[in-house]
Structures are given as C-alpha cells and as structure tokens.
Amino acid sequence: MDQLTRITRDPAVMGGKPCIRGLRVTVGTIVGQIAAGQSIDQILTDYPYLQREDVLEALRYAAWRAEEREVDLTASR
C-alpha cells in the first residue's frame, strides 16, 4: 500500500514491527488503545509527539493487513 507514508519498519526499532514514523510506537499499540476504548484525542494526549494523521494511518494500515488474508475463526472451535 503505497500511500502509507507514516508507517515504518526497521529491524533495529521494536524488532521490526510496524511503527509510526520510526518512533517506538507500534501500530499494534495504537490499535490496541483504540480497541480498549481510547479516543484519538486521548491517544494524542498520551503520546504528544504523535499527530492525528499518525493514528489514522495506523488504523488504515491495520485494516489493510487484516484484509490481506482470510482467517477461519471457526476452525479453532
């Protein structure tokens, strides 16, 4: 996905996990915060060096990755 310019991956930063602009804030951290009920404004307060577009792009990246392959969630039941 070419239009995601704020997501970086570097083996030397957070073990190569997708991060925001090379910072030590992973996409997973942002998505986890949203899933826990945090608002974007709360996240920006907790991480003042992030920008609203960083959070939105992390969500777009996570959605894109979720669509990459289909996982049968009923197979483990």
Image: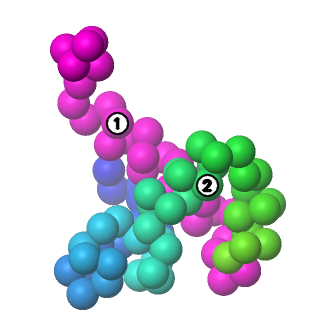
Looking at the image, which residue is at 68% across and 76% down? 47
Residue at which label 1 appears: 66
Secondary structure of the residue carrying numbered label 1:
helix
Is residue 58 shown above or below 47? above
Residue 2, given in percent of the width and then of the height, sits at 33, 56
Q: Which mark is residue 33?
A: 2
Looking at the image, which residue is at 76% across and 51% down? 39
Residue 31, given in percent of the width and then of the height, sits at 53, 51
Give the total number of marks visible in the rendering: 2
Residue 56, given in percent of the width and then of the height, sits at 60, 54
Relative to 56, 40 lies left or right: right
Task: For residue 72, say whether it is visible.
Answer: no
Q: What residue type is disc 1 on?
A: Ala
Relative to 17, 76 lies left or right: left
Instruction: Classify residue 66 by image quadrant.
Output: top left
Q: Kindly report the distance in space between the C-alpha atoms of the residues bearing marks 1 and 2.
A: 17 Å
Q: Quadrant of the C terminus?
A: top left
Is residue 23 shown above or below 43? below
Scheme by which the image is coloured = rainbow
Question: How busy is the neighbourhood of tag 1: few (under 14 within 10 Å), some, or many (20 plus)?
Answer: few
Secondary structure of the residue carrying numbered label 2:
helix
Task: For residue 66, say whether it is visible.
Answer: yes
Front residue of this view, candidates 14 and 76? 76
Q: Which residue is farthest front?
A: 77
Q: Which residues are magenta?
A: 48-77
Q: Which mark is residue 43?
A: none
Q: Is residue 57 magenta?
A: yes
Looking at the image, which residue is at 32% across and 43% down? 65
Residue 63, given in percent of the width and then of the height, sits at 43, 39
Looking at the image, which residue is at 31% across and 83% down? 13
